[in-house]
Amino acid sequence: MAEGAKVCLTGGVNLRAAAEALGVHYQTAYRWVREGSLPAVKRGRTYEVADEDVASFVERRRQPAAPPTIRVRSWPEQVDRLYRALMTGDEQAATGVAERLAANGAPVTTLAEELLAPALRRIGEAWAEGRLSVAEEHRASGICERILVRLSPAPRGRPRGIAVVATAPGDEHGLPSLMAASALRADHWRVHDLGTQVPPAELADLVRKEQADLVVVSLTNEAARPAAEESARAAHATGAAVVVGSPGSSLAALVATARELHATSAEARPGRQGLSPARPPEPGSPGPLPAGPPGRGTASS
């Protein structure tokens, strides 16, 4: 049974059955028992877990984890440092800013929203004011892409589900979709990031091929909304849950929406995780950046 599915057990079950109900390996459930996360009583050579404790554990895992407490004296100061490095194309210095924060406990979602996005807003503004060329803006965006990929986690263990992230035709801004993909990977999703300019029919074909549970259609250019909605309809017709871009939404909101859709649709159709044809597409993919020039397309809203 997949994580997020309803647990219908009577009385207590042994740990192996509980692991199956939770959708994890026996050793993972055993580790949770030893850590005290999953209540259990030892019976002979095994452990017994009450079905209400299994159900409670499923509910807790549905909720996004609280962000870790990190100590950053001044985010604006860190943004200034990154911005100066991006303006001069100093990739080593820019990467160093992000890596020091990551080493201090900042997760990739926090780095994306508190560091990269504000710096890229300023890059976009510099381009709009004529202080930065398209080439220089693309250079800065490329550095941020590589930082994000470098720091994106690859959590171990069984994935929460399969997600496909794409940008609709007509929207050439790719970094918000990369941020969405990184946030979902950090939340234990297996993610296929398709980048920009994905035709709706081909998006739907890949969703079917991969049996994706979730599709995120990133939207940062309002002119591309009709194409994004067409992509969402095509993806939704496959049975996958769909989240459509909404400029300004946070990565935390995206993760929470993805979890809710996944849990609800898994309950509705336990035979295949995360599918709910009756559920319409919902807004919520991030678009935290101001408009920049097309092409590299990473400074957008």
Image: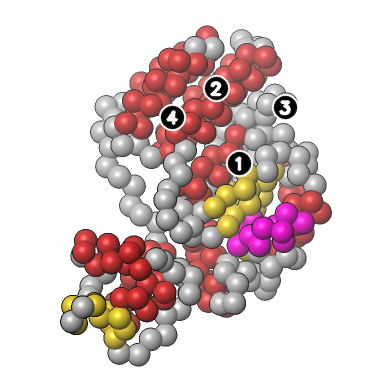
The part of the image, by quadrant, that contains residue 261 is bottom right
Whole-Å distance between the Cαs marked 4 and 3?
Answer: 22 Å
User: For the residues carrying marks 3 and 1, which lies nearer the camera in this image?
Assistant: 1
The magenta region covers: 205-215
Secondary structure state at the residue bearing disc 4:
helix
Return the residue at label 3: 294
User: For this rendering, which residue is in front, 285 or 271?
Assistant: 271
> What's the mark number on residue 187?
none
**Residue 21 percent across, percent down from the top left:** 41, 76
Whole-Å distance between the Cαs marked 3 and 1?
Answer: 15 Å
- Which residue does the image show at 32% across and 31% down from the upper left? 103
Whole-Å distance between the Cαs marked 3 and 2?
Answer: 16 Å
Relative to 156, does residue 80 appear above or below in the rendering? above
**Mark 3 is on which residue type?**
Pro
User: For this rendering, which residue is in front, 152 or 218?
Assistant: 152
**Mark 4 is on which residue type?**
Leu
The first of marks 4 and 3 along the sequence is: 4
Return the residue at label 1: 177
How many residues crowd around disc 3 within 10 Å: few (fewer than 14), some, or many (20 or more)? some
**Mark 2 is on which residue type?**
Ile
The first of marks 2 and 4 along the sequence is: 4
Secondary structure state at the residue bearing disc 3:
loop
Q: Are marks 2 and 4 in contact (CB under 8 Å)?
A: no
- Which residue does the image show at 30% across and 81% down from the upper left? 14
Q: Residue furthest front?
A: 45
Q: Is residue 229 visible?
A: no
